[in-house]
Amino acid sequence: MFAMTNRPDGSWLMSGRLDAGAAEQARSTLGAISDTCRLDCSELDYIASVGLGLLAATQKRLLDRGSELILTNLSPHLREVFQLSGFESVFRLE
């Protein structure tokens, strides 16, 4: 199960599995982000290629507007996924 929870500070907490089953929900939520945003990945267990694609599309849209996604609290496994896919250079990982 996947969820995105908006926090009072404007950041979003992603939790569960960002896979094909969660793609529509993630697309809808990410599509509403219009300014620089922190995505807390501390509770994200898994990300599939479709999830990487959604994040990359959102990043491209935001960068075109002078904003960005900042991914925080990635587990060592998820950080490795971003490194191996080459997405470490696309996102600011904190």
Image (spheres, rainbow, N blue to C red):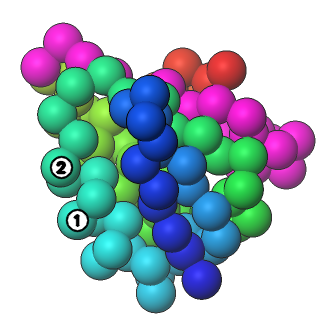
Task: Identify the disc placed on residue 32.
Answer: 2
Q: Residue 33: x and y, percent? A: 23, 41
Q: Residue 50: x and y, percent? A: 44, 68
Q: Which residues are magenta?
A: 65-82
Task: Identify the disc placed on residue 89.
Answer: none
**SS for dot 2:** loop
Q: Is residue 60 visible?
A: yes
Q: Type of residue at label 1?
A: Ser
Query: Can residue 35 be found in the magenta stretch?
Result: no
Residue sitting at x 38%, y 32%: 10
- Picture quadrant of residue 75: top right
Q: State the quadrant of the N terminus.
A: bottom right
Q: Residue 54: x and y, percent? A: 35, 56
- Given contact means CB atoms under 8 Å apart, are the residues at marks 2 and 1 in contact? yes
Q: Type of residue at label 2?
A: Ala
Q: Give the alpha-carbon distance from disc 2 to disc 1, as whole Å.
A: 7 Å
Given the current orientation, which residue lies at the most extreme bottom position?
21
Q: Is residue 46 left or right of residue 71?
A: right
Residue sitting at x 85%, y 50%: 77
Task: Identify the disc placed on residue 28.
Answer: 1
- 10 Å crowding of disc 1: few (<14), some (14-19), many (20+): few
Q: Is residue 87 left or right of residue 7?
A: right
Does residue 61 lie above or below 22 as drawn? above
Residue sitting at x 63%, y 73%: 17
Query: Can residue 72 be found in the magenta stretch?
Result: yes
Q: Is residue 31 left or right of residue 45?
A: left
Given the current orientation, which residue lies at the most extreme front position?
8
**SS for dot 1:** helix
Residue sitting at x 68%, y 58%: 44
Does residue 41 lie above or below 92 as drawn? below
Q: Is residue 87 visible?
A: no
Q: Residue 81: x and y, percent? A: 72, 48
